[in-house]
Image (tube, rainbow, N blue to C red):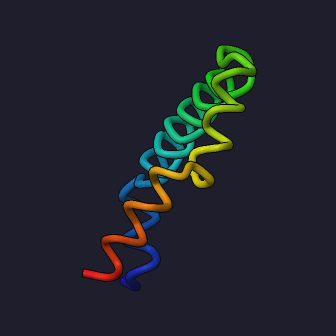
Amino acid sequence: MRLSEIMSQMGLERYAEAGLLIFFAIFLLVAVRAFLLTSKDEHASAARIPLGRETFASNARDSQS
């Protein structure tokens, strides 16, 4: 008996299907949260995070130490 025959008889395809469904459900939740439940102000403030002076100054100090 070959390994491929043994694996096909074990019925493991359900685990792959379950994993795909879980991934898809989480993806949908994240997409809904990002596009529908978040205000424009929250997006704008998150977009400015890398450009903040405090963050830049603290990173510059850390790299000099």
**Front-most of residues 65 and 17:** 65
Residue 62 versus residue 12 in the image, above or below: below
Is 16 in front, or is 32? 32
Taking the spot 38% from the left edge, 82% from the top edge, the residue there is 3
Q: Which residue is drawn at 65% across and 43% down?
A: 48
At x 46%, y 50%, the residue is 54
> Where is the C terminus found, in terms of image quarters?
bottom left
The percent coordinates of residue 21 (x first, y second) are 55, 36
The one nearer the camera, 51 or 29, is 51
Q: Quadrant of residue 5?
A: bottom left
Residue 32 picture location, percent across and down = 67, 22
- Side of 16 relative to 36 (left or right): left
**Quarter of the N terminus within the rendering:** bottom left
Residue 56: percent from left, percent from top: 50, 61
Is the residue 34 above or below the residue 62 in the image? above
53 in relation to 36, above or below: below
- The number of numbered discs placed on residues in the rendered structure image is 0
Q: Residue at x 66, y 19 (%)?
A: 38
